[in-house]
Image (cartoon, grey):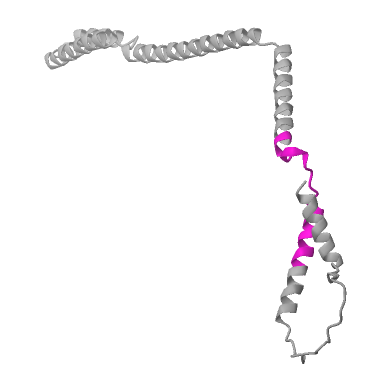
Amino acid sequence: MLEKKENVLLGKVSAEVDKAKEFSKAKNKKEEKDVGTAGRATWKFPIANSRIRVGFQMILIEGAKATTDTVDALRTGAAAMKAMQKATNIGDVDKTMDEINEQTETMKEIQNALANPIGGFDFDEDELEAELEELEELELEEQILDTETTYPVPPVHVPQVNQPNHRPLIKNSNEEDELVALEKEMTI
C-alpha cells in the first residue's frame, strides 16, 4: 500500500515539476514559487522512511514470534519431563537396580556351577601338570634307553638244575608304581 501511495505521490511531484518548468518559461515567478512550495510540502513526510519503519517493525514481529515459539516449545518440554518424573520415582529406580544386581549375581553362580566338573571330581591343575611332566620324562628316558647302543653279550650257558617251579620276581620301579597308582585313581 505504501508503494502505491509513493508511486502516486511521485507522479504528482513530476506533474508539479512540469508545471514549474512551464511557469519558468513564462517568467511567472509568483506561480513558480507556489509550485515549488507545494512540491516540498509533499516530501515533508517521505514514504521511503515509512517503508523502512514498516520493514523494521516486521523484523521485530518475526523475532518476537520466533521467541514465543521457542518459549512454547520449552514449556511443552518441561511439562513432558515433569510428567515422566512423576511416573518414575527414586525408590523404583533403586528397586530396579537391586533386581538387576541380584540377577547378575545369580547368573555368576550359575556360570560357576557349570564350570565345575561333572561327578564331583576336583582336579588340581598343578598336580596334573606335575604328573604329565613325569610321564614325559619317563617316555624320554625310554627313548634314550632304546636308542643306546648295545654291545653283543656272549651267550652264557647255565646248567639246568632241578628247581621248583617258581615265577621269576619282577620288581617295579618307583616310577612304575606311581604310574599304576595314578591309573587306579583315574578309574575311580
Q: Is residue 119 magenta?
A: yes
Reply above or below: 40 against 129.
Answer: above
Q: Nearer the viewer, residue 41 or 160?
A: 160
Reply above or below: 83 against 98.
Answer: above
Q: Nearer the viewer, residue 84 or 175?
A: 175
Place residue 134 in its image quadrant: bottom right
The x and y percentages for residue 122 are: 79, 43
**Residue at position x 70%, y 12% in the image:** 92
**Residue at position x 45%, y 13% in the image:** 60
Q: Is residue 28 magenta?
A: no
Reply above or below: 93 against 152.
Answer: above
The x and y percentages for residue 155 are: 77, 90
Q: Nearer the viewer, residue 58 or 112?
A: 112
* Prevailing SS of the magenta stretch: helix
Place residue 120 in its image quadrant: top right
- For residue 130, say whether it is visible: no
Place residue 131 in its image quadrant: bottom right
| Residue 78 located left or right of residue 135 | left
- For residue 115, say whether it is visible: yes
The residue segment tinted magenta is: 113-137
Q: Nearer the viewer, residue 113 or 2?
A: 113
The x and y percentages for residue 10 are: 22, 13
